[in-house]
Structure formats: structure tokens, C-alpha cells
Image (spheres, rainbow, N blue to C red):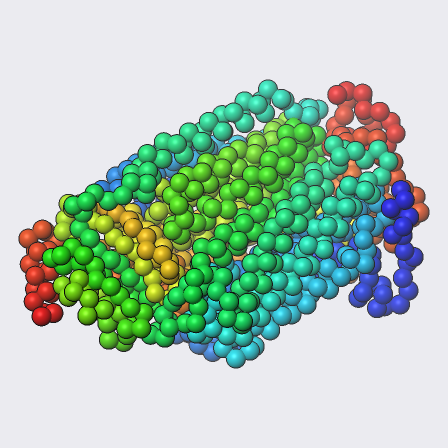
Amino acid sequence: MVAQEAHAHGEPQGFIRKYVFSLDHKVIGIQYFFLALSAVFVGMFLSLLMRIHMIWPTASIPLIGEIKPETYLSLLTMHGTIMVFFVLTTAPQSGFGNYFLPIQIGAPDMAFPVLNMLSFWTTFVAFVVMLAAFFVTGGAPLHGWTGYAPLSALPSAGPGEQLGADLWITSIAIFCIASLMGALNFITTILDLRCKGMTMMRMPLTCWAWFVTAILGLLAFGVLLSAGILLLLDRNLGTSFYVPLVVVNGQIMAHKGGSPLLWQHLFWFFGHPEVYIAILPGMGVASQLLSTFARKPIFGYKAMVYAIMAIGVLGFVVWGHHMFMSGMSPYSAFAFSIMTMAIGVPSAIKTFNWLGTLLHGRIRLQTPMLFAIGFVSLFVSGGLSGPFLAQPLLDIPLHDTYFVVGHFHLIMGVAAIFGIFAATYYWFPKMFGRMMNERMGQIHFFLTLAGTYAIFMPMHYLGLAGQTRRYSQFTEVAYQAKLIPLQTFITFAAIITIAAQFIFVVNLFWSMFKGRKASDNPWEATTLEWTTATPPPHDNFAGHIPQVFHGPYEYSVPGAPRDFIMQTDPAGVTAH
Amino acid sequence: MGLALLVLIWLITFFSTYFFIAKTWWLPHGAAEAAKWIDGQFALTFILMGIVFVAAQVALGYLVWKYRERPGAGKVQYSHGNTTLEVLWTGLTAILFIGLNLMGSSVWAHERFEPAKPDAVKVEVTGMQFAWYFRYPGKDNQYGTTDPKLMDPSAGNEAAIGLNTSDPAAKDDVVTGTMYLPVGREVAINLRAVDVIHSFFVPAFRFKQDAVPGLIIPMHFTPTEVGDYEIACAELCGLGHYKMHGMVKVVSQDDFDKWIAQREAEKQ
């Protein structure tokens, strides 16, 4: 309570304090959301250019011209980096987490509102620096989003590896600082600002997911920040953390004694938890929505909480599975592979529980629920290629092929994006006071689900056939040239799927101004955000701090007057 | 809506599974000893994961359709879960995943823990932007020294890897841009990279290993069929990554001996 009063701040007047440098977690959440929306369109556009270049390498694109092989590599580097950092990390955690975490636990704001504002604007600066890499001499870097040294550490190793690469790593370092601030804020808020009656085990699973994600972020981004600073030193001050004695195009480089594997260990120590940073909030949203729309308590709440924790812990001891072919000790590979298989267990538990939640429910198939169900389908499909790649033996033929590209796009790309879509359709009424259009939402869902499967499932076949990643052309290797028809199919599927996303954008902006007015609780859900006004007032609950009496998933309780009991409803839940 | 969702999820499941089972696109024909073991473990994993995939997707589609909200729908079962079931599927999944992994571990141990046999054919593989070079130690079975100062990529072969010709052990070393190997014999390779990381990937051999600057990585494999096999670089190494392509020619022992003798003669 003391903490709540200490950070309380009056409602700001004036445009700048209200909408630009706002301290209100809801405004900051929306700022993050629109930052991620801009980023996802940049990232998607880059992927479109990549798909076009693969199939029509000499095509001249209006305003851009012909894409050269090195441009292709810049596109893939920036696509991956922008999507991972500025979309998958930004939207589900910083965007929706910022907006709904304080409301769902009954707090008037985040624990540190100024820090919150700083973390958004720092992220914004990081995004601007990242985009700037496109416009400097030499263009954006070509070393891939993983930035493996020595390629990323040597300005002479290729075009884009000069100033572009410096901007790239600087942007990531700034992003890390922003994420550390955000993570700290999330953790403190959850531990300190829960309202009366909101015990940890009464928190919605979304809050659990944001909580564990924040802990992962706090532990992972610090390591990436350090790794990035060392890379900047290698690039600019002549240190040799990652670069041994190398000869680039006949020229001996002024480095000695560094280890390329050191970068990989540090990068993946961040990089693997990052996968869970991207997907855990989606899991939280899926759990929330499956229960709400099936009108049934979530199956195995405690098991879900333990599974999230287990994923969080195990997520830090599996990074080596990215390095089975790297020259790392094969004994380490064996240990990492056992851990990786183990992390499949909590993931499977979650899937079983989602299916268990649907069983004997009464499922309302509105758009948010469609995306939550899509999430489950994609999570299963993307998850089950994991046990192939987790075995070092099978990683021999599959590593760095399209099998991996298909795997991670399905699970941390599309499934996470489905989580974001589900969250958008679900919370839009609360955020903007109007409903999104159902018909447009349904069309968007069906096209996107079919389209993303049509893009990413065939990539598994390509990978099996030995199609290596990050090739701008497939004509140089005979066996790969035979796979071009399947690549062409994927390109057409991508064009259609990308086109379908404009339905979403139209729906989003049209509904913001013209949508049907939303009631305070349009989905008849139980959690705290649905007890307050739509949109919520500046301090969330209009001067009144709620008190919580129940868990978050009391649906269809026998004997209750309605098929849901609000968390704030003092009436008891008898059956248990 | 429930029916449409069921149909879409089931169709996706059907088509995804069909192309795997029909093997329309599949692992290339295996031409090295490890292929049969790796393909066996792959098949086992594929069958188990395939069953889980189909079962989960079919169940998802069915549940969504069966329990959709509609007039006359059954009562919602108020339940917070079932601990016995949780323990059961946690246990089963753990056994399935970990067990599957352990089944493949002996092959991994054979491929990566154990060194090559002493009588294996020795080849040093060097990756550089954007070519592969293969060095054979010659009659003395000893690699001569190389020197970064002598590296001249534009000259190719011996000069590209900076072979120190003043070293007696280097005199009979042969360096080529195409890998020749005798069939049926184990090959002991030393994998090197001079500039950035590359990855030596021969799909038909089920062989892949990164070549890392600063490291010499010993590996081994045994080609089992005569033929030409493609090498594709599997680690992003710069703008020419997509054309860092090479060939392995697996020939009979006689042809191999003749070829290496001829290369030796050309050098003198």
C-alpha cells in the first residue's frame, strides 16, 4: 500500500505529458503496441522482398531497384532482428503487459512510472538507430540476426559490415537497456502492487507469464548487453574477444587469440530464453482466452503455473542446442540435448491442459478465441519439430536448413503473433472503447492460419531435402535447384498471407473510430480489467482499489446466477 | 464457424502429414555409413512425433466443433483439472522425449566422441570466402605447415591455404578444389576456416560440421557408394554464401590412388 501511494501521480494535462511523455502505463502500453505494429510492417515488407528476390532474382522493384545477394542478406538480418526485438519482445510483453498487468492485479499503475516512460523512449531510440542502418554507406549488415563473429566483428568481411553493423549492435545494446528497465518494473509491480486478496495463485495466467518473462528478460538481456559491448570493442578498439588470427581475402587482420564460440555462447545464453520471452506471454493469453471463451475453468491452473516456471528455469540451460554443429564439445551437446528434451515436457503439459479446457466446455467462437485456438494448433506443429532438432544426431542433417526456419517461424514467429492477434482482438474493446469487426476478424483469421501453414510447413520439406538457410539464390547447387518449385509456392503463399494482414489493419483503424461501442465487460470475463470502465480511467479504478475474492477462472460455477463470477464478487464459490 | 475451423485444422493436418509420408521431398539418398543410423533414428522420431501431431490436431479440431456454443449444447463441466492425469501425461511425455533422445545417443557417440581409426584417409578441409580446399598429406602422411602470410586466395589451391613450401613435410602435400575420396574407407578430416565461420555440409553423407577460424576440428565419416556428392556451405559466411559450393567425388581405391599419383606428378 505504501508503495502504491508513493508512486501515485495526478492525471496529466496537456498533449505532451498525456500522450507523448506519459507516465500512464496504459498510454505507454499503447505506445509500445504501435511501435511494434510499425516494426512488424517493416519486418514483413523485408520478408516480402526476400521472397520475391529468391524466385525472381533479377526483378527490379519500384523505388528499390534490383536486389543483390548482399542486399538479400541485409534484408534477412534486419527482418530477423526487427521481428525478434521490436515485435516479439515488444508487443506481447511491453505492450499488452504494460497496459493490462497493473489492471489485472488491481494496481493504479506500474511500480516505477518514470522508469516505464524511459524504457519506452529508450526502445524507440533503439528502433530509430536500427532503421538508420539501412541508410548509411554500405547499408545494413549482412551477418544475420545471430551476428556470428568473426563475420560480424570484421568491417572488411563484407558489405554492410562497416557503419551499418555498428548501428545494428548499438541498437541492440540500447534495446537491452530498455528491456532491463522494463523487466525490473514488471517484477516489482507484480511482487509489490497486488491488491488485497490477489494472492500469487489467484493471478490470471497472463500475469504469471508476464512475471516469468520479466525474470527471463532481467537475466538474459544483461548478458546480451555485455556481449554486444565486447563486439563493439572488437570492431572499433582492436580488442580480440571473438576474433582469432584470421586472413580475410589475403589480408591478415589485426586480431589474435579471440574465440568465435564465445560470442555464440553469450548470444545464445540470451537467445534461447528470448524464444520464451516471445512465446510465454502468448501462452498466457491463450490460457486466458481458452478458459474465458470455453466458459470453463482453465484445466490444471497449478500445473500451468509450474509449467511456466519450469520453462523459465530450463530455458536457461538449453542454449547449447543451437551449437551442436559449432565445434562445441560433443559431450556438452549430449547434456544440452537432454535438457532440451526435458523442456518439451512442460510445453506438452500446457498443450494437454488447453485441450482439457476445451473438453466439455461451451465454446464461443469469437475472433479472439479463433486466434487462441490457432495458437494451440501452431504451438503443437512448431513444438513437435523441436524433438528432431533437439537430438544432436538429427541436427546433423537438419541444422541450418529450412527445417529450422520452418520450426522457429511456426513456434516463436507465427504462434507468438497469433498470441498478439488474440490479445489485440480480446483487449481492443477495453483499450479503445469499441469492438473490432467480427466478420473482418474471421476472414483475417482463416486466411492467416491457412496462409502461414502454407508458408512454413513446406519449409520442413525443403530442410529435409537439404536446402540450406540464408541462400539468396538456389541455382548454384544442383540438388537445391530442384527445390525451386516449392520455393515458388511458398513465395505465392507469403504474398497472399501478407495481403491478408491489411484486413487486420483496416479493421483496427476502422473499429477505433467506427466500431460498435463496447460495454465494460463484452466477453463476460472475470478478471479485474473487466470490472472497471471502458476505457479505464487514469488510475484504473477511479479512486477505488479493488479487492479480490476468487481465482481468475470461475466460469460455469454450479448454482451461480451467471456463468461467470468476477474476481471481485464477494459471493463465495461453493463447489470446488 | 466450429465446422469451418474443424475442416481447416484437419485439412492442414492431412496435407502436412501427406507430403511427409509420401516423401515427396525427403532426405537425399544416403551414401555414407552414418546415413542408415541417422535415417533410422529420424524415422523413429518422425513416427512418434507424427502420431502426437495428428492426434493433437485432430482432437483440437474435434473439440472445437463438438463443444461449440449452440442451442441444446450440453452442460459445461465445472472442473479445475485432474492431478492424476497431470502426473500421468507429465511422466509419459518425459519418458517419450528423454527415451527417444537416449536411443540416438550411441550413434552420436560413435560419430563425435570416438576419433577416426588410425588407418583412415587423411584430408584437411579449409573453408574461406567463398571456396573449399582439400589437402592430402601425400606419401609421408604428414601435413606440412601453413603460414597466414603466404595465403593468396586468388592463386587457388596450395597458395590459397598458404602452404609453406620450404617445409619438407609440405613437399608432397596436394591441395585441390574438389574432394576425392576412396569408397568404403573411413575419412579423417581436419576442418579449418581462415576468415569467418563456414560449415561443411554434405547432405548425402548426413555430415555437417562448422569450420571455425582458430580451431582445427577433427571429424570422420565413411562414404559407402561411388558417385558425385554436393557440398553446400551451411553457415552464413558473407555475400557469396549461396555459391560456396563444392563437390565430393567418391571413387574406387584404384582410381583414388591413380588420381593422387597424377596430382603428385603434376606438382613436381
Instruction: Check the image and report above or below for A34 versus A278.
Output: below
- Name the quarter where the C terminus of chain A is drawn: top right
Q: Position of residue A256 (x, y in %)?
A: 43, 65
Q: Where is residue A287 in the image (x, y as percent from the top left)?
A: 66, 38
- Name the quarter where the N terminus of chain A is drawn: top right
Residue at image position (80%, 50%) is A110
Asked whether, in this view, residue A421 is left or right of residue B37, the answer is right
Q: Position of residue A82 (x, y in %)?
A: 58, 62
Q: Which is nearer the eye, A45 or B187? A: B187
Res B67 quadrant in image? top right
Residue at image position (48%, 75%) is A61
Instruction: Check the image and report above or below for A544 versus A326.
Output: above
Q: Which is nearer the eye, B146 or A172? A: B146
Asked whether, in this view, residue A405 is left or right of residue A221, the answer is left
Residue at image position (35%, 47%) is A396
Q: Where is residue A150 in the image (x, y as percent from the top left)?
A: 44, 64
- So how many labels did they put on this image? 0
Q: Is residue A287 among the parts visible in the rendering?
A: yes
Q: Is residue A370 among the parts visible in the rendering?
A: no
Residue at image position (19%, 44%) is B118
Asked whether, in this view, residue A97 is left or right of residue A476, the answer is right
Instruction: Check the image and report above or below for B125 versus A541.
Output: below
